[in-house]
Image (cartoon, helix red, strand yellow):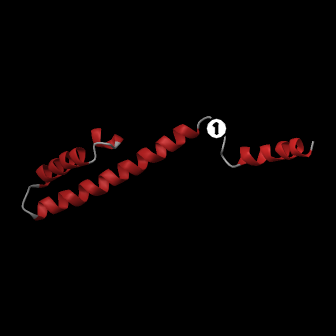
Amino acid sequence: MKRALLIILMLPLFAATGCWHRKGKTKEVTAVATDVEEGFKQRWVDKRAGELVALGQQNDAARQHAIEEFQARYTYLRTAGK
């Protein structure tokens, strides 16, 4: 009897800690991951394009080259295909 009572009292605790799947959470997590990847891509491409411009490439060519390098280097990211 005590064991059953303990289990019943523990159920709300497990539900509150995120152990259970909540509808809509997956979409939120995916959106956050996409935002983080986009930010990383933007910063990486800007930095690399700046390096290429410093080496003498034109702005447009350097940016395109940096995007191509990013896509080749980070193929596992969703944003690399964009």
| Residue at image location 37% in from the left, 49% down from the top | 37
Instruction: Name which quarter of the figure residue 52 lies in.
Output: bottom left
Say what secondary structure mark 1 lies in: loop
Q: Which amino acid does the dot numbered 1 rest on?
A: Arg
On the image, the x and y values in percent for residue 66 come to 19, 51
Judged left or right of residue 11, residue 76 is left
Q: Residue furthest top?
A: 23
Judged left or right of residue 69, residue 80 is right
Q: Residues within 10 Å of mark 1 (few under 14, many from 20)?
A: few
| Residue at image location 62% in from the left, 34% down from the top | 23
On the image, the x and y values in percent for residue 44 come to 27, 56
| Residue at image location 48% in from the left, 41% down from the top | 30
Vertical relation: 62 (above or below) 30: below
On the image, the x and y values in percent for residue 42 come to 30, 53
Whether residue 68 can be seen here: yes
Looking at the rendering, in which quadrant would you find the C terminus? top left
Task: Decide which of 8, 79 is in the foreground and name it.
Answer: 8
Task: Decide which of 59, 10 is in the foreground and name it.
Answer: 10
Vertical relation: 77 (above or below) 53: above
| Residue at image location 28% in from the left, 42% down from the top | 75
> What residue sits right under mark 1 in the picture?
22
